[in-house]
Image (cartoon, rainbow, N blue to C red):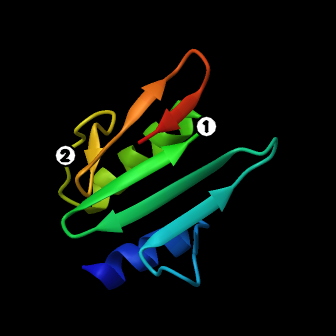
């Protein structure tokens, strides 16, 4: 499964980080980016552009059985707070 996801991410032009092999990043023009992080049986996807994130999730769902749980509320027992008006996230 890990190798299949790794191949998928590379085929979609994501780069795996050197320090943590379960984190993939793709950068775009205008300082835009998407970061995908895998952990145990889930993943967290963050980025600036909701439509690009939506396209990634749609492509992932073609190859993997997955469920979109919406905006993250917690990750690894850390509560995530956000203020979309000022575009800030904090724990």
Report the side of 42 relative to 21 (left or right). Answer: left
List x then y, in percent, for residue 34.
Answer: 57, 51
Tell me which residue sits at (71%, 44%) in the image.
Answer: 32
Q: Earlier in the sequence, mark 1 or mark 2?
A: 1
Report the side of 89 relative to 77 (left or right). Answer: right
Q: Secondary structure at mark 2?
A: loop
Q: Who is closer to the viewer here, 7 or 76?
A: 76
Instruction: Between label 1 and label 2, give the one nearer the viewer.
Output: 1
Tell me which residue sits at (49%, 42%) in the image.
Answer: 53
Q: Where, by quadrant of the figure, is residue 13 drawn?
A: bottom right
List x then y, in percent, for residue 2.
Answer: 30, 80
List x then y, in percent, for residue 78.
Answer: 29, 49
Quick check: 22 above or below 18?
above
Query: Residue 67's mark?
Result: 2
Crowd class of label 2 (few under 14; some 14 to 19; many from 20; radius 10 Å): few
Tell me which residue sits at (36%, 39%) in the image.
Answer: 80
Q: CA distance from mark 1 to mark 2?
A: 21 Å
Tally of numbered tags: 2
Tell me which residue sits at (55%, 83%) in the image.
Answer: 19
Quick check: 87 above or below 77?
above
Query: Residue 48's mark?
Result: 1
Residue situated furthest front in the rendering? 91
Q: Secondary structure at mark 1?
A: loop
Image quadrant holding the N terminus, namely bottom left
Residue situated furthest right in the rendering? 30
Crowd class of label 1 (few under 14; some 14 to 19; many from 20; radius 10 Å): few
Q: Who is closer to the viewer here, 58 or 16?
A: 16
List x then y, in percent, for residue 40.
Answer: 21, 70
Quick check: 35 above or below 50?
below
């Amino acid at each position: 499964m890990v190798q299949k996801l790794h191949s998928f991410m590379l085929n979609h032009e994501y780069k795996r980080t050197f320090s943590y092999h379960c984190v993939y990043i793709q950068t775009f023009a205008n300082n835009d980016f998407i970061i995908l992080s895998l952990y145990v049986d889930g993943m967290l996807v963050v980025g600036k552009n909701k439509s690009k994130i939506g396209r990634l999730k749609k492509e992932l769902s073609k190859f993997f059985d997955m469920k979109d749980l919406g905006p993250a509320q917690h990750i690894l027992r850390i509560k995530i707070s956000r203020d979309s008006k000022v575009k800030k996230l904090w724990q």
